[in-house]
Every structure is written in C-alpha cells, then in structure tokens.
Image (cartoon, rainbow, N blue to C red):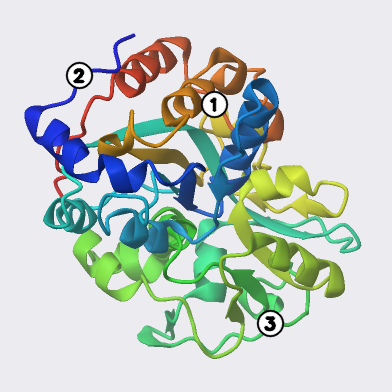
Amino acid sequence: MSYSKFSASVLAILAVSATAAAARDEIRIVGSSTVFPYTQAVAEQFANNTGAPSPIVESTGTGGGMQIFCGGIGEQHPDITGASRAMKKSEFDLCVSNGVTEVTEALIGFDGLSMAVARSNDFDWDLTLGEIYLALGAQVPVNGEWVDNPYTKWSEINPDLPDTDILAYGPPPTSGTRDAWVELAMHAGCEELDFVKEGGFDGDWVEENCSRMRTDGPFVEAGENDNLIVQRLEADPNAVGIFGYSFLYENLDKLKGVKIEGVEPSTDTIADKSYPVSRPLYFYVKNAHRGVIPNLEEFIEEYMSDDALEAGGYLSERGLVALSEDRLRELQDAVLDGKPMASPEK
C-alpha cells in the first residue's frame, strides 16, 4: 500500500503545519460513544504491539466530534473522529472552510441500536417499532388527532405490556446514536401507525412530525456516557436504555436485550439484517496529519488489520459486526492509501 497519494494542496498544508503538529507525541481521537470502545481496543492493541504512546481517545459524541475534528489542522486539532453515522455535508463544508480539505472515510462495520433492561426485570420484552414510537414520540395519534403524547404507562400502549411507568434513558441530540435512532426506529415506527398509513402521509410528513423525542419525563437524555445508562438500568429494573449493541454485548452479565419485531439483538441478527434497527459505524482520518503526527500511519494500519476487522477479529469479539471479505479489502485499500472522500450529498 502507498501512503503518498496526497494532492498538492495537502502537501502544502503539511508544509505549513508540520512543525506545530509534530510537537504532539500522542495520536488524538474524538467522536462517537458507540465507536469509542472499538477505537480504544485498537489503541490498546497498538500500544502493546509497538511500545508507542497509547492514543488519547475521547468520547465526545458524533456531532461534537465532527465539530472538533473539522476545527482545523495542527497539533491542537484531533487526527481521527469516530462516528455512528456518515459525515453530513454541513460537517464536510465546515472541514473545508477550516482547511481540512482531504479526509478519508472508513466504514468499519455494523452495529445494532439496542433497547435493553436490567436482568432483574423478568418480563419477556418484545416491542414493535410502532409501540416504541407511541412510547417515546413527542406527538402521537389519539382518537384521530395528532396530539402531545399522553401515555405514561406501557400498558396504555398495549395491555399485554407491563403496567409500569414508561422510562427510557437514551442519547442526546449531539449523538450519532440519537440521529440513527430517530431515523431507523422513530420514523419507521411512526410509519407503522394506522393514522399515518391511512392518512397517506409521506416521508416528508413523517420527518417533520415524527422526529422529536418527548420531553415531558418518560424519555431522559443520559449524555454521551453509555456506561451511565447501564448504571441507571441496574438501579431501576423498570427502566429501558437505548444505546449501541456493543454496550449491551459488553454488559450481558447485567442487561438483556429487548426484542424488536420479535427479533433479539445479536451479532448474527444484525449481520443477516433480520434485526430491524442497525447502522454502519465509521471513523474519519485527517490526511494532513499523516506523516506528521508520530505513529499515526502505524495506528491506522492496526485499525485496518485483519486481526482487528475480520469476522472473528478482536473487534468482532467486542460486538462489531464485520464487513464482508470483499468490502473489507476495498476498505483497507482506500484507507491505507489515504483516498479522500467526496462531499456528501446532504
């Protein structure tokens, strides 16, 4: 693989920033709380293999990470950001406006968006996407009217569900997990409702009216620290949590997954697409820092290694659902060669 395929503009940026950037010894990484445990695992493996300083990995959320990553080049700016959704055009434009003109995108694998409860909760949870929307949407249909959500108990949505208060801990708006949850669970759940289907409402209507999580108490934004949600579920067996599958996978001794549409979240059901709420995971590399920040190339090589990313690799052991072999080889070639991404369409 060649690491020299940078444009003249990037080489010019390197010439300007090399002295400042080289003053920092540690690789700096920000971004998604969902991607964080995978990147942290690679950082530990890299440090063990090479003896180099372990990269500094911060869990800032996808949106926050993009803002920091796109802030500029040089030692004060991070080298990589993790993301639980693809970079938006507005974020790409922010990067370009701040001189971050060449970025490589890496789709590293897939993750399920999980609902979970404490193991001490003995109910056999199985929710439809429509029931999830009715529990957590800011507005819902009641008697043919679109109104503020009145439901306070699960049994009010379906009498077969527990007669307990709805309480769900989930990610804030800055999180890519929140963006993906709204798109994959809330929009899809809203589209299941008879009110929407029989009313002939289109995708634009759904996006406008079904994107807001309720703010009257049953849904609680728990910040970017998914471990805090795990602690809250342990403390309250009636609560449910929303986070990436990796956190459920890492805490199966404490938590159990909620089935969605009859399917339990697992690496197998996410891989075969039978689990209805799954999404790709990414990281983004600032190409102007390659060859300038010590050990950055070597760290990227470790992240792209078969040991890390293949099915059965150490990241799949932590819950990442691996790419197919063909897609993995294509990814490795693009990332190791520093192939710059094109501007997203939206």
Asked if residue 283 can be seen in this view, the reply is yes
Name the residue at the left extreme. Answer: 8
Q: CA distance from mark 1 to mark 3?
A: 33 Å
Label 3 Cα crowd, 10 Å radius (few <14 / some 14-19 / many 20+): some
Label 2 Cα crowd, 10 Å radius (few <14 / some 14-19 / many 20+): some
Please give the residue where the numbered disc 1 appears in the rendered image.
Answer: 272
Q: Amino acid at mark 2?
A: Lys
Q: Which mark is residue 153?
A: 3
Q: Earlier in the sequence, mark 1 or mark 2?
A: 2
The quarter of the picture where residue 105 lies is top left
Name the residue at 45% across, 48% down.
Answer: 84
Q: Nearer the viewer, mark 1 or mark 2?
A: 2
Name the residue at 24% across, 59% down.
Answer: 203
The quarter of the picture where residue 268 lies is top right
Q: How many marks?
A: 3
Q: Quadrant of the N terminus?
A: top left
Q: Nearer the viewer, mark 1 or mark 3?
A: 1
Helix, strand, or loop for circle 1?
A: loop
Helix, strand, or loop for circle 2?
A: loop
Name the residue at 71% across, 61% down.
Answer: 227
Q: Is residue 154 above or below residue 29?
A: below
Q: CA distance from mark 2 to mark 3?
A: 58 Å
Please give the residue where the numbered disc 2 appears in the rendered image.
Answer: 5
Q: Which mark is residue 327?
A: none
Observer-nearest residue: 17 or 226?
17
Q: Is residue 121 left or right of residue 30?
A: right
